[in-house]
Amino acid sequence: SDLTEARYANTALMMSNLNDWVTPFFKYNDPFLGKPPFAFWFEALFYKIFGIADFVPRLPSLFITLATLWLIYKLVITLHDKLSAILASLIYMSTAVVFMLSGVVMTDPFLVFGTTLSLVSFLFVINGHKEYWRYLFFVGSGIGILTKGPLALVIVGGIITFWILLDFRQRVTTLRLFPWVKGLLLMCAIFVPWYIAQEIKNPGFLYYFIVGENLGRFLDTGWHGDKYGYVHKEPRGIIWIFWLVATMPWSIIASIFIVKNFQTIKQYKIVNFTKNTNISFYLIWSLFIIIFFTLAGN
């Protein structure tokens, strides 16, 4: 059985009991080097506020999922219309994987919030809503790195890169809208202090986490370097099946819609989708992560 939720809940409980906000622990005197602490901080804080109960470490996942939901609603109602925003919100929250992860002790809802904050901010900025969004773009990436490491940069950077490549001459200029020096300094201020503190306190952390948990886990099918859990060894490409199940019922509804309207979609031509600034971004955002993990065997 998968003991991930129990392991993470216990890690947060030890953080709360020990008042050690730098190093999460797998067991007492056994540092947990597999994840950064952003999610554990919230769960440990909730233990302190509400005491020990099964529902307590699950509450932060619910609240951070609702925060992600608000970002989606804010984006769609601003760039499109109220009905679309309501439908987008309902679809998001009723998707199987989102509904499930909103009530479990895992880091994924926090990673989703960080990457969503960055990508929503990016869309706001390129649509003329600069204000604070051009800085929140970097804040989101910092949160993602402090939650699950470099994967956050791969997701955000990969989606934006592919979107730019669809119409390079026009879209590469959008990068000038962002305060890169100040923004990158802000992003680093969010995650670098903890990474340094963790390496000082637990020498070898950076090598194990960056090289092992990220590169090793992704590139090596059946990677045996996991110190805490087990690798989910699966055939490459199985992510597409997982995606169909995880996004039910909407994956089924969308598949039926595409089949029934295939000729209409074909006549509209894919180039019309790629040239539309926002629609092309939504499509890449939807597909990039699945395509990326098609290459992974874990």
Image (cartoon, rainbow, N blue to C red):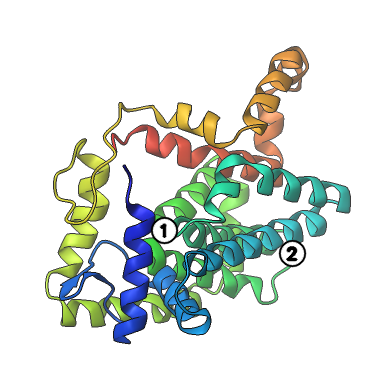
Q: Residue at x 58, y 65 (%)?
A: 64
Residue 192 screen position, x and y as percent: 33, 78
Q: Residue at x 38, y 65 (%)?
A: 9
> In the rendered view, does 55 fall on the left or right side of 31?
right
Q: Secondary structure at mark 2?
A: loop
Residue 122's quadrant in the figure? bottom right
Within 10 Å of disc 1 (Cα), the crowding (few <14, some 14-19, many 20+) is some
Of the image marks 2 and 1, the number of the one nearer the N terminus: 2
Q: Secondary structure at mark 1?
A: helix
Q: Are marks 2 and 1 in contact (CB under 8 Å)?
A: no
Q: Residue at x 81, y 57 (%)?
A: 77
| Up/down of 81 relative to 296, above or below | below
List the residue tagged with mark 2: 128
Residue 66's quadrant in the figure? bottom right
List the residue tagged with mark 1: 153
> In the rendered view, does 262 fall on the left or right side of 237?
right
| Up/down of 246 relative to 75, above or below | above
Residue 225 bears which disc, if any? Answer: none
Q: Amino acid at mark 2?
A: Gly
Q: Residue at x 53, y 36 (%)?
A: 246
> In the rendered view, does 81 fall on the left or right side of 167?
right
| Up/down of 238 relative to 230, above or below | above
